[in-house]
Amino acid sequence: MAFFGPGAIIASVNIGSGEIFFPSRTGSVFGYRILWVLLLIALLKWILVYTSMRHMILSGGHPCQRWSSIPGPPGWMNLFMVAVAVICAPLWLCFLEGVLGTICTWIFGVGSLHAWASLWVAVALLLLAVGGYQFLEKAQMFILGVTVSCILVAVFHVRPDWWQVMQGFLVPVALTYPEWLARELPEMAARSPWLEIMVYAAALGGQSYDYLAYVSFLREKKWGHSDGGPVTPNRLARAAAHADDPARLWVRAAVIDTVVSFAMIVLVAACFSILGTVLLQPHYLVPDGVNLLNYQATFLTTLSPLLLPLYKIGVFFAFFGILYGGPEVTYRLLYEFGLTLGKTRSELENSRLRWATILWILLGGLGILWLTRLFPQVDLLDIVTPAGIYTGVLLCGFYCLANIWSDWKFLPKELRMPRFLMAANLVAGLAFTGMGLKAIWDYDQIRGFVILAVLLLGSMLVASRWKRIRPVSEAQ
């Protein structure tokens, strides 16, 4: 447990949309057949996270620092990642705020989701200002721990078909909508199954910019060389020459941390997916619209009706915790990006950057949510879909491919990732990139590729013209 650090954040922050809402929804639609997707996406994201953590422990270089030197205009990759994060983060927060508002209308039976969302955004801003979240954080972890424990008990209580569960995990099959979906939810049936699965894949375990922030938390853990910035070539050479070098031994901590955290993510998500299959699918119940999370209450009330309040409190804390912690994760990405800059970095005040990030994400998401009142046909899932495609799928592919380049460029041969891990990154990178491009086409056709091209070329153009954002190494 001493080595369960940044991964604990991955597991706890994502017990919300990624492990409560989407697995239940996909389980109710696709049944046990969705489980192999869950396992595959978790494995691909584990490869991404572990490889970048390994590189930072060995060399002290955060991915943002390494990507500053990727061929092309200096820093274009970082600009692209930051631009997508800044655009998409308010869309994710809009979705989470909307879900939180929906939960409150279900719990209290009064008010609109927009009003409730506004209230809790105000509370989150107040707690971020005064730093009074410590008690709520402890309460959140306790209540979520009890809730998840009851969910584990409920899985065995409902007696799923364990043979089908095993097949669902190990036998990949094509996923199509059931026939009853067109009758019960024609709006969802009109949505591509591929898009539905890609948004699920994006939410499971976090997004690409989340992982850049999580790797940054290694600075506090001080594993290997992770806290002192990129080390000298001489220090890397000494580590390469000695198999028992402390930095090389600390890589084991990253293995433990990432394996435990993703195992927890798979376990919790699988439980919700199985319960969705057993308890919701036979009754044609799909979490959607105003019923985003109330159907899932049966997961606990199947044990006892007395557990309904626990479920309500648990899901409230799960989504409010993300509302509170999400802006901090995005700020951490911007902080790491700032470390790669020259003179511009010295002019940035961390407190101002932090609050600019918080206000942009929380209030930006809330503004988008209120705009949906003018377009009642727009569903919350419609808002988060493009953000999920970019941040949770496509950019994960870029991240994996960049992992290979970082090791090849900055580490001596003896410290580079082994061949099987390099092959795994290559497969994961191509898979995420291919899935992301297909999802963009299915979602927005040619216009989607035009937007992607504008973001990529715009980042390169800005990086080539704006000298003040040149990486530190370039500026020196």
Image (tube, grey):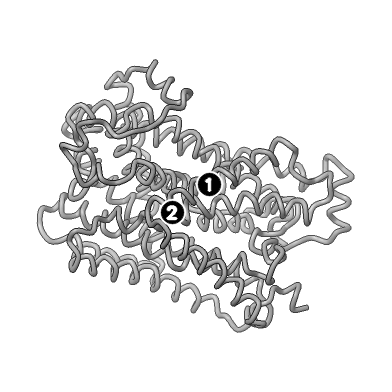
The amino acid sitting under disc 1 is Gly
Residue at left offset 10%, top offset 57%: 110
Pointers 1 and 2 in contact (C-beta within 8 Å): no
Residue 327: image location, x then y, percent? 43, 64
Measure the C-alpha gap from mark 1 to mark 2: 10 Å
Residue 36: image location, x then y, percent? 45, 30
Residue at left offset 64%, top offset 63%: 64
Quadrant location of residue 47? top right
Residue 116: image location, x then y, percent? 20, 62
Instruction: Tell me, yes or no, if residue 448 can be seen here.
Output: yes
Residue 88 horizontal side relative to residue 123, left or right: right
Residue 291 horizontal side relative to residue 19, left or right: left
Indicate which disc, 1 or 2, sits on the residue closer to the N terminus: 1
Quadrant location of residue 133? bottom left
Q: For residue 434, which numbered disc appears in the image?
A: 1
Helix, strand or loop at label 2? It is helix
The amino acid sitting under disc 2 is Ile
Disc tally is 2
Front-lying residue, 93 or 332: 93
Residue 72: image location, x then y, percent? 69, 67
Front-lying residue, 90 or 133: 90
**Can you say which quadrant of the picture contains the C terminus?**
bottom right
In this rendering, the answer to whether 443 lies above or below 293 is below
In this rendering, the answer to whether 311 lies above or below 211 is above
Residue 445 horizontal side relative to residue 255, left or right: left
Q: For residue 447, which numbered disc appears in the image?
A: none
Front-lying residue, 78 or 296: 78
Q: Which residue is mark 2?
A: 440
Residue count near mark 1 (Cα–Cα under 10 Å), binned few <14, some 14–19, many ≥20: some
Residue at left offset 83%, top offset 40%: 244
**Can you say which quadrant of the picture contains the N terminus?**
top right
